[in-house]
Amino acid sequence: MTATKTSPTSIPVAERASRFAYAIRDIVEEARRVEAAGTRVRYLNIGDPVAFGFETPPHMIEAVERAMRDGSNGYEPSAGILPAREAVAAEYTRRGQPMSPDRVFIAAGTSEGIELTLTALVDEGDEVLVPLPVYPLYTAVLCKLGAREKYYRTDSSAGWLPDLDHVRSLIGPRTRVIVVNDPNNPTGAVYPDAIRRELLEIADRAGCVLVADEVYIDVSYDGPVAPVGSLDLDSPVISLSSLSKAYLAPGWRTGWIAVGGGERLRNVATAINKLGEARLCSTGPMQHGLIAALNGDRTHQETFRAALRERAEVTAGRINAIPGMSCVTPRAAFYAMPHVTLPPGKTDVDYVVGLLRATGVLCVHGSGFGLPAADGFLRIVFLASPGELHAIYDLIADFTKDYLRG
């Protein structure tokens, strides 16, 4: 007897998945449709230097190859191999923030570092202060944790610096974390020490943790920026960084968490380690590349910074010359946050999707970083060559002229 088959029904997914959004990659679906229709797409949405021809330093690659040949292909300690943790600790110590290897944890990039850190710090219903505009991974992780983000303003007219009075006004009984992304993605801002000290003081007085996303401290055009924790060694700071940007190895997914704060954060360090044990370990061979990166030659960073400064100046100059557009000149990293004066009733998504369909230029709408859609901001990744950028900004100028005419 043959069993009667029931009609297939869609299996439900977790409710949290419907709340989850990550605009930097979500916009790619539309780009693929544009490509399928025969238009070349210029991807200015993801900050991957390797995709634009910047090369990982050879001594790092050699260290990974050697580790593989020498048999470092099995599971490693969950917190990371000791020499890698020692290298990270020594790096912070050199930069003015003494660090012990037992307060360092090797993660699968800063992205995993963010998730492990926030998971160790916040419960459902807790509040985390994040800058606006925000790197969207923070809000995506908080969504999964059932915690609540509270946005503190940064001011585009003041170089995208934080509004400290607004930060103070948001502190409440459920505040657990203040996130500081400096140098900043998506704006390219670099915070002066006076503001960084104020943020440390706010966190200290509130009894919460300052989570410092410091991935770009070596790609500030005026030279490396000191870790924020070095400004106050007793401050409750957790620093996150990786090999992805300054060491040109984003695909290696190798980063670290460095827990300062002395005894106040000892239990947090224990919790991060416990959570890390559940996922076994980060990639073993790449940890040997980390050691080579932090202990080896860094002359590539000088060349990289100079190349980025040139691209930032091209970007700001060309965008500011387009009627109806403006752009704060970035001071670090490879992102700019231009503004376009939208026609009534239009949103940043309308502009970005219209630009993509008309020209093949793919940017990310500002509302993907938490900004109001009607404000007319978008993020550009300017890693392409200066010549390519000029061609791209020609396309943006022509499109914007027509768009603003309606």
Image: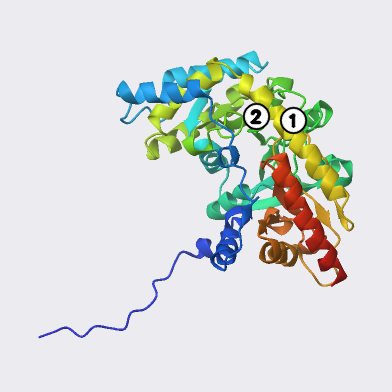
Disc 1 crowd rating (10 Å Cα; few below 14, some 14-19, many 20+) is many
- Dot 1 or dot 2, earlier in sequence: 1
Disc 2 crowd rating (10 Å Cα; few below 14, some 14-19, many 20+) is many
Task: Measuring from the top left, give residue 243's x and y in whole percent.
Answer: 55, 30
Among the 4 quarters of the image, the one containing residue 358: bottom right
* Quarter in which the C terminus is drawn: bottom right
Mark 1 element type: helix
Mark 2 element type: strand
**Image coloring type:** rainbow
Q: Amino acid at mark 1?
A: Leu
Numbered-mark total: 2
Q: Taking 388 as reference, is 309 above or below it?
A: above
Q: Name the side, left or right, on which 101 lies relative to 301.
A: left
Task: Measuring from the top left, give residue 96's x and y in whole percent.
Answer: 68, 15
Among the 4 quarters of the image, the one containing residue 157: top right
Q: Amino acid at mark 2?
A: Val
The residue at 73%/40% (across/down) is 386
The residue at 68%/21% (across/down) is 234
* Quarter in which the N terminus is drawn: bottom left
Q: Looking at this view, is 272 or 63 the one in front? A: 63
Task: Measuring from the top left, give residue 240's x and y in whole percent.
Answer: 59, 32
The residue at 46%/32% (across/down) is 273
Task: Measuring from the top left, give residue 71's x and y in whole percent.
Answer: 29, 24
Q: Name the side, left or right, on which 131 lies relative to 277.
A: right
Q: Looking at this view, is 55 or 137 the one in front? A: 55
Q: Which mark is residue 200?
A: 1
Q: Which mark is residue 237?
A: 2
Q: Looking at this view, is 145 or 398 the one in front? A: 398
